[in-house]
Image: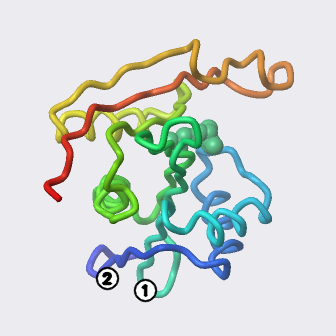
């Protein structure tokens, strides 16, 4: 896709569920969840999810939720960019715009689990920490170790925590 076509961002709707599933397949770097899971995220968690469209085609997706045990923490589940839309800062743009939503007003920490093979995501969160002038911590204890997955099926997913983010002026 030529970079000349503008990319627009918006909250998802349930109609995006299958195109998101197809995007995650194309991205090839994330756990492919069920179509139902993406339908549910796009429908019930739209306030903290984002889709990116270019020329009518889905090229980016972020799924996230406010942690039930700590509403000040936004847990970012997946960040996906279509291979043809990479190199334009789209992942950072989606995350930044997600954090700018009113629903994210109380967010002080951004969390995610990132495996060693997902260098792009790790760099994204390191960049978020730099822009936010805050720290990025990593915890294997609070993440999801490979032993929690079926034997040999998954790499470690240590928890990454960026924050504290500055409070936005009300
Ligand atoms: C931030 C991010 O994309 N994490 C991925 C977690 C996990 N491997 C998944 O794909 O759901």
Q: Position of residue 49 (x, y in %)?
A: 51, 62
Secondary structure beneath dot 2 equals loop
Label 1: how many residues lie within 10 Å, few (<14), some (14-19) or many (20+)? few
Is 35 positioned to the left or the right of 57 in the image? right
Q: Position of residue 112 (x, y in %)?
A: 50, 36
86 w.r.t. 18: above or below: above
- Ligand 1 is located in which of the four quadrants? top right
- Quarter of the rendering occupied by the C terminus: bottom left
In the picture of the structure, the residue carrying the numbered disc 1 is 55
How is this picture coloured?
rainbow
Q: Residue furthest right?
A: 150
- Quarter of the rendering occupied by the N terminus: bottom left
Label 2: how many residues lie within 10 Å, few (<14), some (14-19) or many (20+)? few
Q: Residue at x 56, y 46 (%)?
A: 77
Q: Position of residue 163 (x, y in %)?
A: 29, 32
Is 106 positioned to the left or the right of 77 in the image? left
Q: Is residue 82 visible?
A: no
Q: Which mark is residue 130?
A: none
Residue 45 picture quarter: bottom right
Cβ of mark 1 under 8 Å from ligand 1: the answer is no
Q: Are marks 1 and 2 in contact (CB under 8 Å)?
A: yes
89 w.r.t. 29: above or below: below
Between the C-alphas of marks 1 and 2, the distance is: 6 Å
Q: Residue at x 71, y 73 (%)?
A: 18
Residue 19 picture quarter: bottom right
Q: Residue furthest top?
A: 141
Secondary structure beneath dot 1 equals loop
In the picture of the structure, the residue carrying the numbered disc 2 is 5
26 w.r.t. 17: above or below: above
């Amino acid at each position: 896709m030529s970079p000349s076509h503008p990319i627009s961002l918006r909250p998802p709707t349930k109609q995006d569920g299958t195109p998101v599933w197809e995007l995650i397949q194309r991205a090839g770097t994330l756990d492919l969840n069920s179509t139902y899971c993406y339908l549910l995220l796009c429908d019930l968690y739209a306030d903290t999810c984002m889709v990116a469209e270019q020329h009518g085609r889905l090229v980016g997706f972020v799924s996230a939720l406010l942690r039930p045990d700590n509403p000040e923490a936004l847990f970012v589940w997946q960040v996906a960019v279509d291979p043809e839309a990479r190199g334009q800062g789209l992942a950072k743009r989606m995350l930044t715009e997600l954090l700018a939503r009113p629903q994210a007003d109380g967010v002080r920490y951004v969390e995610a689990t990132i495996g060693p093979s997902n260098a792009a995501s790790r760099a994204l969160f390191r960049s978020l920490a730099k822009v936010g002038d805050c720290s990025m911590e990593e915890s294997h204890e609070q993440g999801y170790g490979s032993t929690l997955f079926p034997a040999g099926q998954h790499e470690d997913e240590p928890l990454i925590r960026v924050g504290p983010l500055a409070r936005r002026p009300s």
